[in-house]
Amino acid sequence: MITFYDLAAKEPIKHWSSNTWKTRYVLDLKKLSYKTVYLEFSELKSVLQRVGGQPGGFVSLTVPAIVDNATGSAVSDSYQIAEYLDKQYPDTPKAFPSGSEALQAAFYDRFNLARPPVAPIFYGRIPNILNQGSIGWYRDTHEEWLGKSLEEVYPVGEELAEIMRKTEEFFNMLDGWYSHSGGPYFMGKIPSFADFALGAFLQLLKIILGEDSAEWKSISTGNNGRWEKLLMDLGKLACTES
């Protein structure tokens, strides 16, 4: 059994962090049994210090993080978790299909560099999906870091329009890449970490923008509905969460 640490949110929202979605997709791809422990932001440091305190513990006190009870290994960072699970469980489907490791790394690097600057949209909306145990912590830490209130950060007018234009350009770029694939996924007919990185970002956009928002509908139905279909295909991965 693997213990998977994720971020807590208000009901009925279960999973919202793009970082932890990547790991959830990998665990489901491999059909590995796991249980999820949901943490408030204020709990992250203390809990992860405790459970990852053994030699070779977590790289960072952030989620996603897993503890593999079969080996005692504690691993954080979605990319490193995927690498660990591929190595530790070689007889399961691979997040990095054999021979594609360099391609996957190049995709992930370019994906992160090109990802549109949507963070200002999220800052003020994320507290709306958090439990009371996280709202104050999130607001205090982010407003101190940003030097202004979350409401002041939210883009409006031309600034918001420019962010949405860059978001459209980003998905057009990805559509160009996927159009060369022989199937619904980046690697054709098999899902891989590239799809999980993109699917995780889409999940975050869907939750934060709102499923009924014009912004989300524009993204999900754009590029001939490719991204809505990708989420549906990824959703078919068997969940083995306990």
Image (cartoon, rainbow, N blue to C red):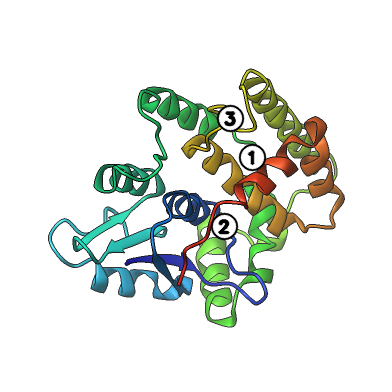
Residue 97 lies, with reference to residue 129, above or below; the image says above
Marks 3,1: beta carbons within 8 A:
no
Check disc 2 and report its element: helix, strand or loop.
Answer: loop
- Residue at point 35% right, 28% down? 98
> Horizontally, is 48 left or right of 109 in the view?
left
Q: Looking at the image, which residue sits at the far bottom?
A: 132
Disc marking residue 114:
3
Q: Is residue 10 left or right of residue 45?
A: right
CA distance for labels 3 and 1: 9 Å
Q: Secondary structure at mark 1?
A: loop
**Tag in front: 2 or 3:** 3
Q: Which mark is residue 67?
A: none
Q: Amino acid at mark 3?
A: Ala
The answer, for residue 203, to whether it is visible in the render is yes
**Residue 50 sits in quarter:** bottom left
Image position, residue 122 (x, y; %): 66, 55
For label 3, count other residues whose C-alpha is less than 10 Å away and answer few (under 14), some (14-19) or many (20+).
Answer: some
Q: Residue at x 56, y 55 (%)?
A: 146
Q: Nearer the viewer, residue 39 or 159?
A: 39
Q: Amino acid at mark 2?
A: Gly
What residue sits right under mark 2 in the picture? 147
Residue 117 numbered mark, or none = 1
Q: Is residue 161 visible in this depiction of the protein?
A: no
Calculate the distance from the C-alpha at mark 2 to the C-alpha at mark 3.
Answer: 26 Å
Which kind of residue does numbered mark 1 sit on? Answer: Pro
Q: Please give the name of the residue rendered at 64% of the width and 25% of the height, measured from the top-left corner.
A: 178
